[in-house]
Structures are given as structure tokens and as C-alpha cells.
Image (tube, rainbow, N blue to C red):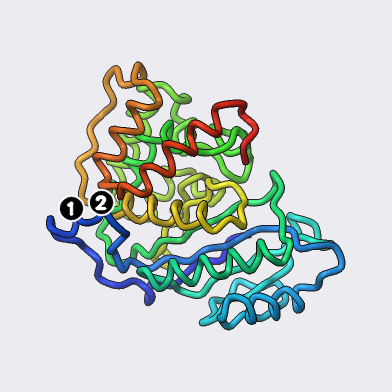
Amino acid sequence: MGIDYPSKWVLDTHNNEATHTAMETAMTTTTRTFGVEIECHRPAGMTTEALAALVRERARVECYAEGYNHMTRAYWKIILDGSLGYATGCEVVSPVLSGEEGIAELRRVMNALEGAGCKVRVDCGFHLHVGASDYKLRELRNIAKCFVKFENFFDHIMPASRRADANRYVLSNRSRYGGYTDLAANAAMDAFARARSIPALISANQNSRYFKLNLVPLTKYGTIEFRQHSGTVNADKAENWVRLILSFVEQAAVARPRARRGEKNLTPAEEMGRFFKMFHVPENVRAFYIARRRELHRDGTAQ
């Protein structure tokens, strides 16, 4: 279940050309805010209160167990998640995070969860919210258009359970426009381009939050949610997803995505290379996803 992050958390983050060069070879420098929802299963017999206490101790963060709610907090919270089963399922929700400090804090929490014996199954997800209330409609349209244009890329770095429409809670943003062909991608891009308001942009995405790119939080919270990542308590997977998406959002907002013409003939590696270049993905993140794609497609079982 999703927790949305309010627009007041968004900071001014547009990078200049010098920063872009640094981002391609080093760490993510943007201070754009983000928040995560970590769906996982705690060890049998461990209460959410016990898990929160462990996270407080090992990750050195404020973390408390609460009843199910959609309230935003200034601390980490752990709530039960009925969609995962109340016996062991839970959702670990972050406060607002940003910059390298935010990523370091996320890593500490992920390591604490993994060390506590938390596990993920195919029913779990790792949801990422990105602050976007500073963006104008044109920039938001660009982000949506870029996502559907490169949805094949995102599918290639996810396990089979998170591709196309395999999961009803993580649906394709382009398939309602005709599937995964160039024509479908262009039709989706055209629909987003015609939106003359944020509600119209959300309507072009079927007014539902159960999409890989969820636009519903924009009107109330000023955030965009990326729901596609499979469940994980692995710090490296979490960090690289955050860095990839932050680079994507920053660059997609100012991009001029063109219609796809014959690009269905690109190999996955070529599509990945085009994505990395267009969205200024840092080199360390590129290396991670090159290896990750190979792992996922070697036998189709990686999670």
C-alpha cells in the first residue's frame, strides 16, 4: 500500500552542465527529495515493535511501529500490510530523504532489515516517491513521455514478475495504448502531450495508482511514484534504483522526447546505452545495471 510524500519536502534541484558531467562519473549530486516504501516479510514471531527497535539500534535512526495509516512522519515507521498477510507482512516507510545523506540512511536501514532476517517474496515491492511539486505541466508531461518511450528498458532491468502487465498492481503505462510496439509508445506519448492540466495528465494514465509510473499523487502531494522495482532488502539494489530514478527524473523533465521510429529493432544493450546517455546516468549505476540485466536474463529467475 502506498504512502505519499507532501510537496513541502521538495527542494530546488536543477543541475547545471558542470554538475551533469560529474553525475556521469561519480555520485548522485541532486538534492531532489525522495521517500521509499519497503514491503517485506519479517521473521516468524517477530513483532513490528521488535523490528522497529532493532532498526533504531542498528541503523541509528528513529523508527517506530504504528497501526496502518497514510500519515507522513518525520521518522521511519513500520506498519502491517494486509496485502502481504498480517502474520509476517509489513511495510517500512521512510521520512523525507535527500542527497548522499539520505542514500546513506537508506542503506543503513536496508542493512538492518536484512540483518534482522527480513525476506521478500514475489508479492513484495520497493516503491520510490520523488518530489515533483516544483515542476510545471510541461516538465511532468516530459517525464511521463520519457517513461513510456523507455518502458522496455525498465522491464529489462526487472524480474519477469515486474515486466509488462505481469503484476496487476504494477501495470504497464503504455499497454492500454496498444501494447509494446512503437505505435503504442507513440500513442501513449501523444496522449500525455495533449494533457492541458495535471488532472488531465493523470487521466491519460487511467486515473489509477497501480502503474509502474504512478501520477496520482501529483494533485494532492506533489510527488511521482515509481512502483516497478521488485521487493528487496538489499542496500545495493535500493541505492542504485534511487540513483537511476533521480537521474531519470531530472533529465526527463527537460528532455524533448521524440516519437519512436523503428527503435523496436534495438537490442536491449543498445536501448540501455541510449537510456544511460540521454539521462546522464552515473557510471557506477550504469555498471550495476549492466551486470543486473545479465543476471536477470541468464536464467530468468533472479529477484
Tell me the crowding category of disc 2: few under 14, some 14 to 19, or many 20 or more residues within 10 angstroms, Cα based.
some
Q: Position of residue 243 (x, y in %)?
A: 38, 55
Tell me the crowding category of disc 1: few under 14, some 14 to 19, or many 20 or more residues within 10 angstroms, Cα based.
few
- When the figure is inspected, residue 189 is found, relative to residue 249, above or below; the finding is above
Labelled disc at residue 25 = 2
Q: Position of residue 94 (x, y in %)?
A: 54, 71
> Which residue corresponds to the image point at 48% horizontal and 34% vertical from the top-left?
293
Q: Are marks 1 and 2 in contact (CB under 8 Å)?
A: yes
- Residue position marked by numbered label 1 in the rendering: 21
In 3D space, how far apart are the residues under numbered discs 1 and 2 (Cα atoms)? 7 Å
Instruction: Determine whether, in the image, residue 160 is placed left or right of residue 288.
Output: right
Q: Residue furthest left?
A: 17
> Which residue corresponds to the image point at 58% horizontal and 39% vertical from the top-left?
162
Looking at the picture, which amino acid does disc 1 mark?
Thr
> Which residue corresponds to the image point at 45% horizontal and 25% vertical from the top-left?
180
Closer to the eye: label 1 or 2: 2
Considering the image in quadrants, where does the C terminus appear?
top right
Instruction: Determine whether, in the image, residue 83 is placed left or right of residue 37.
Output: right
Instruction: Give the SS element for disc 1.
Output: helix
Considering the image in quadrants, where does the N terminus appear?
bottom right
